[in-house]
Amino acid sequence: MKFSITLFLISWLVFIIFADKKKFFTFSPTCYLAIILGFVTDLLIHYYPLWSYPGSTDFQKCMRLYLDEFGVYFVVTYLFLQTLPKRKTFITIGVHIFLWTIPSILIEMIALWLESMKHDLWWSLYYSYFADWVLFFIFYLHHRLRVKHT
């Protein structure tokens, strides 16, 4: 639980310092998509436990999920969109996603090392890394389509 609280606070501190708040209404719909996808995967792992968050009570487990969704998922998605390259080619977007998957997988590695998270069944860091690529690509596409059609 300490890891989740610390990550939540650091996420929002980074947001306060680095986020371009003038673009909040441009980026926030995609950030809300990230939150929704986070809740969907958390619901999924309740029935098919690919990973788990050790905690002594159901309340602590629930709070950890909310801290992740409304903290790191929102902030990382926002900053990912804010730092999109001006010239958007297949290569520049690929490099951008690659650069954002590194801290994402490092956070998960720290959570595993601190035993704040545990991989179950067949899940591993490799699947998480692949999922990070897919998610960042989805966030990019969602943002691009939303901006294009508004």
Image (spheres, grey):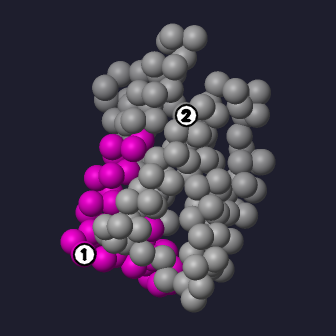
In the image, residue 130 sits, relative to residue 61, either above or below, namely above
Label 1: which residue? 121
Is the N terminus in the top left, top right, bottom left or bottom right quadrant?
bottom right
Would you say 130 lies left or right of 104 here?
Answer: left
Q: State yes or no: residue 110 in magenta.
A: yes
In the image, residue 139 sits, relative to residue 132, either above or below, namely above
Q: State yes or no: residue 50 in magenta.
A: no
Q: Nearer the viewer, mark 2 or mark 1?
A: 1
Provide residue 149's location: percent of width, then percent of height: 51, 10
**Which of the two discs, 2 and 1, labels the residue nearer the N terminus?**
2
Is the C terminus in the top left, top right, bottom left or bottom right quadrant?
top right
Provide residue 72's location: percent of width, then percent of height: 60, 56
Q: Magenta part mainly helix, strand or loop?
A: helix
> Residue at the spot x=55%, y=47% of the render?
35
Label 2: which residue? 30
User: Rounded to the nearest whole Å, what is the CA distance between mark 2 and mark 1?
Assistant: 30 Å
Q: Which structural element holds mark 2?
A: helix
The stretch in magenta equals: 108-136
Would you say 51 lies left or right of 139 here?
Answer: left
